[in-house]
Image (spheres, grey):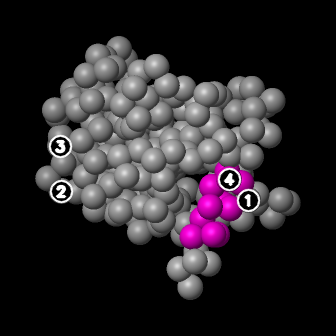
Amino acid sequence: MSDFCPALWPEDSTPENLKDCSECGLDQHGTRMVWGEGNPEAPIMILLDNPGAREDREHRPFVCGTRQTLQQAVNQVGLTVDDLYVTYVLKRKPTRAYDKDQTRQICMNHFKQQLQAHEPKFIVCLGNIAVQSFFQNPEYDVKSLRGKFHDVHGYQTTVAYHPLAVRRRPNLWTLFLEDWQLVADQFYRFKHADL
């Protein structure tokens, strides 16, 4: 759509008691915690691997490629920032090697807290890390699970490729859009049933 312009979605503040969380060790990587962004009360919760960067080296806010691609797709299927809440397996961007499995397991406890607090109607896992972390199966991948909804821990959940993978492999764009259309269709059915 020609009027689409990427924007930094409002950031959801990290709970005070977790701002200095050091349980997983990522606090030693020098990146700040990002709890989530978008609308915390939204019916659709999106799970990504980590928050990436919301600021450049001079600490000026910017919209990274992952966010641009995600926003372009949701805009194209008619969803808005009010419909969506984005959060992450890891709440800090890793900057060097770390124990991936252990760190993801620890950090998923934060995601479970968010699920209980927000009770979304739908969850969209973007990329294999989000899929494997939420489905709790290291063998699962986007390719074999995409295109339909699954009941995962009592939540209607679907999956799509990571926006960064879509940027690197433009042939995935059509599939990415199909998956977001699936989400939009399910969301509108739910919305109309609720009226």
* Residue 149 appears in the figure: yes
| 122, 127: nearer the viewer | 122
Residue 20, image x and y in percent? 17, 43
Q: Which residue is mark 2?
A: 16
Question: Which residue in the protein does label 4 denote?
Answer: 182
Q: Residue at x 37, y 17 (%)?
A: 96
The residues tagged by marks 4 and 1 sit, at their Cα atoms, a distance apart of 9 Å
The quadrant where residue 102 appears:
top left
Nearest to the observer: residue 63 or residue 86: 86
Q: Contact, CB < 8 Å: mark 4 with mark 3?
A: no
Predominant secondary structure, magenta span: helix
What stretch of residues is rendered in magenta? 180-190
Cα–Cα span, label 2 and label 3 = 8 Å
Spatial distance from mark 3 to mark 1, Cα to Cα?
A: 38 Å
The alpha-carbon separation of the residues under discs 1 and 2 comes to 36 Å
Q: Is residue 9 magenta?
A: no
Q: Any mark on residue 77, and which?
A: 1
Numbered mark located on residue 20 in the image? 3
Mark 1 secondary-structure assignment: loop
Q: Secondary structure at mark 2?
A: helix
Provide residue 90's location: percent of width, then percent of height.
35, 36
Identify the residue at image location x=64%, y=69%: 188
Placement of the N terminus among the 4 image quadrants: bottom right
Query: Which residue does the image show at 34% across and 40% down from the upper left?
Result: 91
The residue at the far right in this view is 2
Q: State the count of labels.
A: 4
Residue 90 versus residue 125: which sits nearer the camera?
A: 125
> Which three-letter amino acid code belongs to the residue tagged 4?
Leu
Q: Earlier in the sequence, mark 2 or mark 4?
A: 2
